[in-house]
Image (cartoon, helix red, strand yellow):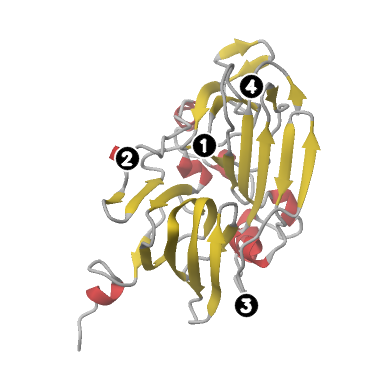
């Protein structure tokens, strides 16, 4: 990271393991299958295992070899870019899904194979835009930086898709030029903190927001989606499970207690969670959450562009839908 004009950026990255960490597995589908063999005996909250400081900020990494990350095919990283700083241009071999937790900034993205749309002092870019807290973004690969005169910090939550072949594969079809044009001009961000746009709202309990490929079409090419929860104190988020995706959870504020049960009925996680904790809820595993006295907020990344959640209790639950004999 290098110093520049009056900027600030703070980044958190929860990333799906890149292809180069899976050399020897064969095809990308085989790598994904091997990575998602969830034979875990225990799940726990986890914190960064190492950090790297520079003049412009700090980057923290989680241990991608932990069983829960290997199960979901994910790794995690948090980066902080200080005021008057920027990141050097960089890229990832796999797409990223970015969540801006706090603050605002500028991010420039260059898509390989897409024509340049404008010139900047440092080179050519296809997309550049202001990002702010509450916005998950599509593939963010180059030069995230903060806007002039901004105050506070910006946190990025990023998720990298396992394997880097999806972008090229998406261009195959009867009209590749049309697909490339759509891909190169897709909107890359969606605001997730507008109370009027909550997917689920309860005056007593709180709000749930989600963004999938129907709201942000570029997520179709990433194969992921995001969810943000804001629950009030002492609320019980009833048991539920995600049918078609693993879930990477990052607690952004508050505290509570979470329980995760495997599809074999074994309790793998029953702990208090607090701000800064990261943990994985594997596909098909049931979970429930009891919010603490100060409420809780989180952001979750799901490994499907259209995740499906099924409640275990309540009027829309699987048991309610089963007819009694």
Asked if labels 1 and 4 touch by Cβ distance under 8 angstroms, the answer is no
Density class for disc 2 (Cα within 10 Å; few <14, some 14-19, many ≥20) is few
In percent of the image, x 62 and y 38: which residue is there?
Answer: 11
Mark 4 or 1, which is nearer the eye?
4
- Disc number for residue 269: none
Residue 88 in picture, x, y percent from top left = 73, 27
- Disc number for residue 7: 4
Residue 19 in picture, x, y percent from top left = 69, 50
Location of the N terminus by quadrant is top right
Mark 3 or 4, which is nearer the eye?
4
Of the numbered discs 2 and 4, the one sitting upstream in the chain is: 4
Asked if labels 1 and 2 touch by Cβ distance under 8 angstroms, the answer is no
Q: Quadrant of residue 70?
A: bottom right
- Mark 1 = which residue? 138
Q: Residue furthest front?
A: 293
Disc 2 and disc 1: Cα gap in Å?
22 Å
Disc 3 and disc 1: Cα gap in Å?
33 Å
- Mark 3 = which residue? 41
């Amino acid at each position: 990271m290098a110093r520049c004009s009056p900027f600030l950026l703070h980044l958190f990255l929860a990333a799906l393991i890149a292809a180069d960490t899976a050399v020897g597995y064969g095809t990308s589908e085989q790598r994904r299958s091997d990575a998602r063999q969830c034979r875990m005996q225990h799940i726990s909250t986890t914190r960064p295992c190492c950090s790297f400081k520079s003049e412009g900020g700090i980057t923290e990494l989680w241990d991608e070899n932990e069983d829960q990350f290997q199960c979901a095919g994910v790794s995690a990283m948090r980066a902080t870019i200080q005021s008057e700083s920027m990141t050097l241009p960089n890229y990832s071999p796999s797409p990223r899904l970015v969540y801006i937790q706090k603050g605002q900034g500028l991010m420039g993205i260059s898509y390989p194979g897409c024509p340049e749309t404008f010139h900047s002092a440092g080179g050519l870019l296809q997309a550049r835009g202001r990002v702010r807290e509450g916005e998950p973004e599509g593939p963010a690969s180059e030069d995230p930086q903060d806007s002039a005169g901004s105050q506070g910090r910006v946190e990025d939550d990023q998720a990298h898709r396992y394997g880097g072949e999806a972008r090229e594969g998406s261009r195959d079809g009867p009209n590749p030029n049309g697909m490339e044009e759509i891909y190169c001009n897709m909107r890359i961000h969606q605001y997730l903190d507008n109370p009027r746009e909550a997917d689920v709202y309860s005056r007593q309990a709180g709000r749930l927001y989600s963004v999938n490929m129907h709201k942000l079409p570029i997520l179709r090419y990433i194969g992921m989606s995001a969810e943000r929860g804001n629950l009030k104190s002492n609320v019980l988020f009833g048991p539920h499970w995600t049918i078609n995706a693993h879930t990477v959870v990052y607690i952004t504020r508050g505290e509570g207690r979470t329980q995760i049960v495997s599809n074999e009925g074994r309790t793998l996680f029953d702990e208090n969670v607090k701000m800064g904790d990261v943990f994985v809820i594997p596909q098909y595993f049931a979970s429930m959450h009891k919010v603490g006295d100060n409420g809780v907020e989180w952001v979750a990344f799901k490994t499907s562009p259209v995740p499906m959640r099924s409640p275990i209790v309540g009027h829309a639950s699987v048991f309610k839908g089963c007819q009694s004999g």
